[in-house]
Amino acid sequence: MNSIYDFISCGEFLLEKGIIKENKLAGWGYSAGGLLVASAINTRPDLFRAVVLKVPFLDVCNTLLHPILPLTAIDYEEFGFPVDHEEFLSIRKYSPYDNIQKDVPYPAVFVTSSFNTRFGVWEAAKWVAKVREVTRYDPERPVILNLTTDVVEESKYLQTKELALETAFLIKMIHDT
């Protein structure tokens, strides 16, 4: 939780000092960084105008409870061991999927995921579906899921294409405010 609060504090600092104008703050998180950014927008959805979550780790409790998945045993030390009741409760406090606020407008979100990643594509799909279902809809702040079957990490062309798409999304969302 400290990392999430620190990330939020950094955003607040940028706004307070006038480095970023109100309604122009964006976040970008990759993998576990996606967990950080998603948790931050769950905590302070009003702070951010737009975010990109790139192959994010979003359903922490369920993923860590299934040790056959590629992300688990070695990650218990970092994320917690959900079989232990106290640690499970701690994980639930920061798990993005478990903390989406109801009836609150969220920032524009662009989530990318791939069928060829160590995080299950279902995490991104479940999180996007739940955000769309329980938060307040705003057509100016879309929640977009971009899925690919390509192995983006192995192709400079595909990496550049994906980066261009994500960057264009952020520019469009920030520019139009």
Image: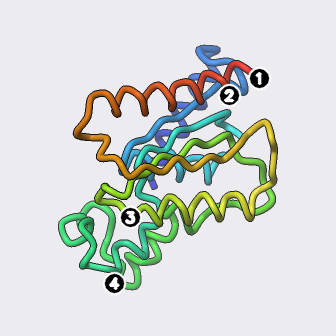
* Vertical placement of residue 95 versus 39, above or below: below
Q: Residues within 10 Å of mark 3 (few under 14, many from 20)?
A: many
**Proximity of marks 3 and 4: CB atoms separated by less than 8 Å:** no
Q: Which of the image's four quarters has the C terminus?
A: top right
Q: Amino acid at mark 1?
A: Thr
Q: How is the image coloured?
A: rainbow
Q: Is residue 138 visible?
A: yes
Q: Look at the numbered disc 2 and give the secondary structure of its residue.
A: helix
Between discs 2 and 4, the one toward the N terminus = 4
Tell which tag, 1 or 4, sits nearer the viewer. Answer: 1
Tell which tag, 3 or 1, sits nearer the viewer. Answer: 3
How much space separates mark 2 and mark 4, taking CA atoms? 41 Å
Residue 118 in picture, x, y percent from top left? 29, 59
Residue 24 in picture, x, y percent from top left? 67, 24
**Proximity of marks 2 and 4: CB atoms separated by less than 8 Å:** no
Q: Residues within 10 Å of mark 2 (few under 14, many from 20)?
A: many
Which residue appears at 67% of the width and 58% of the height? Answer: 131
Residue 78 sits in quarter: bottom left
Q: Residues within 10 Å of mark 4 (few under 14, many from 20)?
A: few
Q: Is residue 174 left or right of residue 66?
A: right
Between discs 2 and 3, the one toward the N terminus = 3
Q: Which residue is mark 4?
A: 84
Residue 62 sits in quarter: bottom left
How much space separates mark 1 and mark 4, taking CA atoms? 45 Å
- Residue 177: give its label: 1
Q: Which residue is mark 3?
A: 120
Between discs 3 and 1, the one toward the N terminus = 3
Q: Is residue 164 left or right of residue 12?
A: left
How much space separates mark 3 and mark 4, taking CA atoms? 23 Å
How much space separates mark 1 and mark 2, taking CA atoms? 7 Å
Which residue appears at 23% of the width and 65% of the height? Answer: 77
